[in-house]
Image (cartoon, coloured by chain):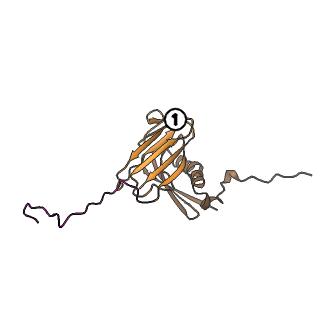
Amino acid sequence: MDEYGRGWSKTNPVIAQLTGSYVQQDPEIGAKTVTTTAAELFAGSVVLDGRYKMIVYNEGSNNVYWGKSTITAQTGFPLLPGDSVVFTFNPTEDMPIYFIAEANTVVRVGELA
Amino acid sequence: MTYTITVNSIGEWLWECDVTVGELKGKTRVACETEQEAYDYTEKTFLPDLRRNYPRLLSDLVFPWEVVEPEEVIE
């Protein structure tokens, strides 16, 4: 402790490391099919461990819709053909994002961790 | 190359599907009414997407509906 009650000083600094804000492992990229069944979306075979960002690009010709598990094509938030959306996550929390469409539509997904 | 799909209920209208194919393991969550719908999604959508994204691992994966029966020759 210094004279001000701080546990750090110029000669004894506290090192703080930021996590969840820059790429620390290989990104996961994949093409996924959004169908008329709502399902969580991620790029690989499982959700990328420690992901803090997910980018979804709709390369199909139909809208896709996203939201929580109860979404439908009538209630989800639309992602139009040719458009993309970015999700930011807390890397330590499990937070699935579900996608659904009115017809099978291919999207490109990128995950960063 | 064979695959196994296991479907477990994790909530109302929510299923967790585990997949093992070759040395690759996958897991996804599906929001639908029945276990059969979740299984069908995993087999007919999730697995084909895995094959497309992991061609070096899953190039030998052939689905039952892709098997072409030999034509019967009648002489």
- Going 87% across and 52% down the picture, which residue do you hit? B73
Question: Given the current orientation, which residue lies at the most extreme front position?
Answer: A10
Q: Quadrant of the C terminus of chain A?
A: bottom left
**Could you tell me which chain the residue with mark 1 belongs to?**
A
Q: Which residue is mark 1?
A: A63
Please indicate whether residue A60 sits to the left or right of residue A95 in the image: right
The foreground one among B58 and A35 is B58
Note the chain letter of the brown one.
Answer: B
Query: Helix, strand or loop at disc 1?
Result: loop
Placement of the N terminus of chain A among the 4 image quadrants = bottom left
Q: Position of residue A21 (x, y in %)?
A: 35, 53
Measured along the vertical axis of the image, is residue A25 above or below residue A53? below
Number of marks drawn: 1
Q: Nearer the viewer, residue A70 or A91?
A: A91
Q: Which residues are magenta?
A: A1-25
Chain the render paints orange:
A
Can you give x and y, in whole percent of width and height, for residue A61 in the image?
57, 35
Between B67 and B13, the one nearer to me in the picture: B67
